[in-house]
Image (cartoon, grey):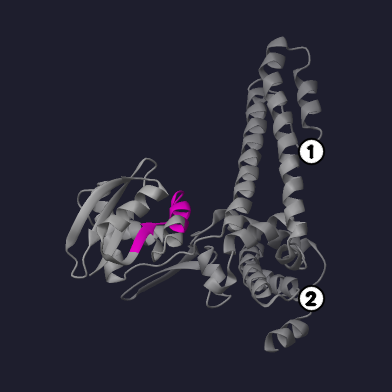
Amino acid sequence: MNVFIGLDLSLKDTAVCVLTEKGDILKEAKVASEPADLVAFVHELGCQIGSIGLEAGPLSQWLHKALTDAGFETVLMETRQVNSALKGMPIKTDRRDAEGIARLLHLGWYRPVHCKSVSAQEHRAILTARKAIQKTLKAIEQSVRGVLRGFGLKMGKVSEAAFEARVRELVNGNAMLEIAVAPQLRLRNIQRTELAGLDKEVKRLANADPVCQLLMTMPGVGPITSLTFKSAVDDPQQFRRSRDIGLWVGLTPGRHQSGELDISGRITKAGDAGLRAALYMAAQSMLKGKHNWLKSWALRLATRRGKKFAKVALSRRIGVVLHRMMSDGTEFCFAREEAMAMRAA
């Protein structure tokens, strides 16, 4: 008898629901959120395992790998779709969530999510740490500006290198303000040192990776964008078409259609926010860089729809072209004719 197993993960325990082929509940349990315990529980069932489903999340990649390595067909399920399906339950508990996931798996009403490789997860960990330090650094600088503003001391526009000197110039002679900003400036220096170290590591990883080197042949794409794109996509074959990248990363307009109503709105902003931001930064950089067919296309679009619209559209198209480059192993073509000839070949 084939059974379908739904897992609702939490940090300590995992709620498990086992369904038969007919959709009847065979067993419900709580198991420690450890690979060995989950594998042992599945083996103890003594049934033919159809598939195991779990919602994509912080623990899911780790447990997915362990269950797959143990020989079970394991599916990562798209989070937003699972959440939408489970909203219909009047009472929300871990047990009911596990049952809902098992039923989605049994019915086949789910969207599978690619489980990233270990190297992709490691690269994303470094990029996430870098982003966290960036945010902390920005928060410290805003805090210092806010403290000074309360006393009528205005920082104005100042470079990162000159920030500390400008602050000390403004608080000079005021002992209380010097005491208030001194620890923040020390923290800022530590954060800048750590951020520089992570930037150096990101550049090293990108320069040592052949895929990142290939992606960096596109103008506007540097080590951070290339490593972000490679670690986010991981396996380009998971996308049937390159243009699906735009939808996946949330750079396509949302649409609401019902009867006579048909509204196209702003971009959905679904998916990886870090990748979306990296592609937008690449678009901004490309528009300031050397001439190429993508830049020309964006400038023509800007004359009709405006610069902001053109930047978002260029971000989406950069993602599409990067995916094609990653799939085919080809460098960026600066001329449109060369790019079309390469595509036809």
Which residue is pictured at 35% across the width and 51% down the height?
38
Give coordinates of residue 93: x percent, y percent: 25, 46
**Label 2 packing within 10 angstroms: few (<14), some (14-19), many (20+):** some
Question: Bounds of the magenta span?
Answer: 52-65
**Label 1 packing within 10 angstroms: few (<14), some (14-19), many (20+):** few
Which residue is pictured at 31% across the width and 57% down the height?
42
- Apparent side of residue 246 relative to residue 215 in the rendered image (left or right): left
Please identify the quadrant where the C terminus is shown: bottom right
Mark 1 and mark 2: Cα distance apart in space: 34 Å
Is residue 322 positioned above or below 137 on the image? below
Q: What residue would you read off at disc 1?
A: 159
Say which label, 1 or 2, has the lower sequence index: 1
Amino acid type, label 2: Phe
Asked where in the image residue 302 lies, by quadrant, the reply is bottom right
Q: Is residue 239 magenta?
A: no
In this rendering, does residue 8 appear at all? no
Amino acid type, label 1: Ser
Give coordinates of residue 231: x percent, y percent: 61, 59
Which residue is pictured at 69% across the width and 33% down the height?
191
Give coordinates of residue 183: x percent, y percent: 68, 20
Q: Nearer the viewer, mark 1 or mark 2?
A: 2
Q: What residue would you read off at disc 2?
A: 334
Give coordinates of residue 148: x percent, y percent: 67, 23
- Apparent side of residue 39 relative to residue 218 in the rendered image (left or right): left
Which residue is pictured at 74% across the width and 29% down the height?
189
How many labels were placed on the picture?
2
Q: Mark 1: which secondary structure?
A: loop
Q: Mark 2: which secondary structure?
A: loop
